[in-house]
Image: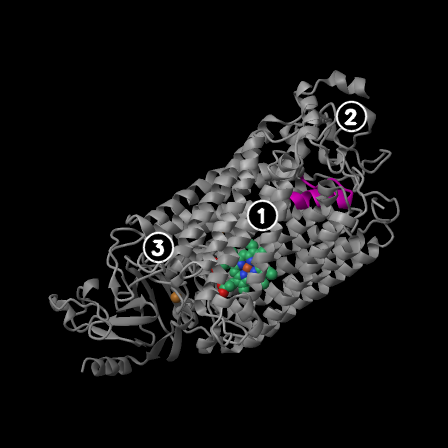
Amino acid sequence: MAVMHEAAHEEHKLGFLQRYVFSQDHKIIGIQYMMTSLFMAAVGGVLAMLIRMELGWPGARWGLAKWLFPGGFTGDGTLKPDFYLAVVTMHGSIMIFFVLTTALSGGFGNFLIPLTIGARDMAFPFMNMLSYWLYPPAIVVLLASFFVAGGAPNAGWTAYPPLSALYNPATGTGLAAPGSGLGQSLWLVSLAILIVSFLFGSLNYITTVLQLRTRGMSMGRMPLVTWAQFTTAILMLLSFPVLFAAVVMLLFDRHLGTSFFVPSGLVVGGQLVTHQGGNPLLWQHLFWFLGHPEVYVLILPPMGIVSEILAVHGRKPIFGYKAMVASICAIAFLSFLVWGHHMFTSGMNPLVGTAFMVTTLAIAIPSAVKTFNWVATLWRARIHFTPAMLFAIGFVSLFVTGGLTGIFLGSPAVDVYFQDTFFVVAHFHFVMASAALFGLFGGLYHWFPKMFGRMMDERLGKLHFWLTFVGIYATFFPMHFLGMAGEPRRYYSPQMYDFLRGLSGLNMFVSLAAFGLGLAQLIFAYNFIRSLFRGPKAEGNPWHANTLEWQADSPPPHGNWGATLPTVHRWPYDYSVPGATEDYIPQTVPVTAAVVAGGALHHPVQGGAPDEPPTTDLNSA
Amino acid sequence: MAEIPAATGERRTGRLLASLIVVMIVFGGVGMTLLARRYWWLLPVASAHGVDVDRLIYTTFVVTGIVFVLVHILIAAFVWRFGARGTERAAYWHDDRTLELTYTLVPAAVLVTLISMGAVVWARVHGPAPADSMVVEVRGEQFGWLFRYPGPDGIFGRVDPARISPKDNPMGLDPADPASADDLVTRELHLAVNRPVRVRIRSKDVLHSFFIPAFRVKQDAVPGMTVEIWFTPTREGTYEIACAELCGIGHYIMRGKVMVESADAVQTWLAQQSH
Ligand code: HEM
Ligand SMILES: [Cu+2]
Ligand SMILES: [Cu+2]
């Protein structure tokens, strides 16, 4: 236990910088990730509002916005088409990589993994610190692209070449679009930096889970939130290097004269391009080999978070724990085999399309199992409708809605019609963006007391939920119909086409709903910031939860546990056990000290771990 | 202070949430879909395989619609009923092999059905084109479409990107190739009704996507590749071609037109073009 004492002493010795800025404590790093991601969420959210301004009232004049974004508007206040594309690109890139990945994996992963498995910290605390500190430079590089010649990239978050690849060194702007100049290069460099950060993080998570579980914490007793983080880290470790390679190759194509993605004989802006022999589809394959696992990187952690919240605030064991773990693993595995469903219209062989249809619809099965397990968890629960619980239930609804539209898109003949229309925008905003956001909010309301030692305001939290839930459906549900009618995405204005004329009313409605949704987030911001300073002090275990993090102080001290590490004696979901004195039995309570019902004790998965000496239980009881 | 909120208000909140789900999501969703069918819907279908695609869309719509309504009603019912009350406890119920197996196998069966139906339509869409098909070439560029008919010899002449000149030779035809002499390059696409057409899709510069909403046709134009698709227009009229793959700042104005008319009318129009 010498290590521990050192840790405890260290805390007093560390200066402010080492404690709160260049900290190696996983909790501080998690909070740093979270705060930075929330800041980026505000940036990405403002960009979303700009998108909806333009699509609601194409070509309208916006006096005020002109002053806020001087370069992006013409003198009379209309948004410029290239700025519009820059905004769409940055909105998508920021939300996916700089908000959701960083908040869910970097934020919750860092904070929760060591605490839920009874470790004092990550396996490699220094690398963990590096992982966080690569993130702000990546942001600076990314946002700098707004200020260089040609502006921020125009090629979408998918950055398909040749549009993104052709660069004019003489002017510093792009050949095929203004934003494909220096801005696109900065975007690529920024992603490369961020990927390194993710790899440091994920290596750390995997090692920590495998090596640092406390006594009795077998894999089969890990809470689902930890299982989700663990699997996500594996996904990230395997898929992000592929994007890294693609990013470097694209940078080479742009600046060093290689030609991985650009074929011979292109004529752009009246000029014959000198590249030879590349293939644009190669980028799409590489990009989506990451891109599809990436959407599971965004959704698995919320799935874990929601499983936790439903059990704790429903006072009931999660239904089908083993099926939940199995489906997390199945989803993670299958997610590597479905990337081609983004390429049904790309010109790849139709037979390959058939194969990807099968894998894609196969992934719907474990997703359905998870959904039904959550619903079954609600049956005969005793639900406490805290803000966390409301967001968790909202998550299930959003995931169902978004998942079902995925069945359309997974079928290639149908996807041919919907590909690159607003139907896709609706689909992924439900299943990935909104669902992940609900996981994030739910998780914040749930773990805020643990992170900051204070409670958030319940009434404001509920108000935030009602407005966000209604706002999300009002914003994104009608987008399905825009897509039904055929409105393509990434259009500066849909009014050039006769067949899209009838959609302007619906587009205005969507925009108004989006503004409302955006405004509702101010309630959260206010509640969050106020509670940080003024919230009532939280107890160690305000929700009466079983998992280990709730058995530590709020917030847990440096090193997390007092003199001895906790010992785990049971699975995390002993809620409402018949005959027990309380309606929850923390994982640290020995089997002999509290009744165990339902046969969980003798369960091969949920029962005793091999590394758990049975005698200690008796003694400590 | 920091304790589990008293269980008194829980049922009220649960009922509010349940009502919201039923009214907003179930009735709102279904109602809006009915409204959408009148105002914001697929264009009337105007191609042969579009009919199959639409059938698949509607089947998927019905299946997913039923699941959407049922699951939401289930959630609403549970949320309505199972709000915490006093100190009453939840059921300690966490596994049920039969139930879990049911909701693994039933979705699996439904999905296998949908996969099979989807595979059939997809194979038909991408099956070999009928021998009597007409052939046209479509080339995307920033920001418009160019079409080429092979002329009486039925052969597309060689093109050379270096020869492209916007005014005189937008397609970059190579005069050294005799087959290019009778090629017809146009800015409009005219197709014969009920005659299958093979469309060879190319791009001059970046990715584009050849999208004819009324035909349920979409195919990316990939630089460096020629991708061929075929379809059969079934109704005379004028239809819009849109670009569905981001291609630069003019992506949203990259509009084209297809005229579907009688075979004679197409011949007459072609004859006019060659003069
Ligand atoms: C206030 C909430 C949001 C609104 C109103 C909103 C709105 C939009 C709209 C209208 C587009 C389509 C633009 C177009 O294709 O023309 C879009 C694109 C996108 N959004 Fe959002 N969004 C929101 C939140 C999010 C979140 C939380 C994510 C997180 C994943 C996200 C990810 C994306 C992505 C990846 C794209 C595609 C960008 C591209 O085409 O390159 N959005 N958003
Ligand atoms: Cu995917
Ligand atoms: Cu385009």
Disc 3 marks a residue whose amino acid type is: Ala
- For the residues tagged 2 and 1, is the chain the same? yes
Chain to which the residue tagged by mark 1 belongs: A
Q: Which mark is residue A299?
A: 1
- What residue is shown at x 36% (from left), y 49% (from top)? A250
Q: Quadrant of residue B34?
A: bottom right
Q: Earlier in the sequence, mark 3 or mark 1?
A: 3
Vertical side of A452 occupied by B57: above or below: below
Q: Which residue is mark 3?
A: A165
User: x%, y% of residue A72?
Assistant: 48, 67
- Residue A361 makes an appearance in the image: no
Quadrant for the N terminus of chain A, please.
Answer: top right
User: Which stretch is magenta?
Assistant: A304-320
Q: Is residue A76 left or right of residue A387?
A: left
* Distance between the alpha carbons at the discs numbered 2 and 3: 62 Å
Vertical side of A292 occupied by A423: above or below: below
Q: Quadrant of residue B238?
A: bottom left
Disc 2 marks a residue whose amino acid type is: Val
Q: Which residue is mark 2?
A: A591
Nearest the camera: A470 or A162? A162
Mark 1 nearby-residue class (10 Å; few <14, some 14–19, many ≥20): many
Q: Is residue B81 left or right of residue A17?
A: right
Nearest the camera: B23 or A273? A273
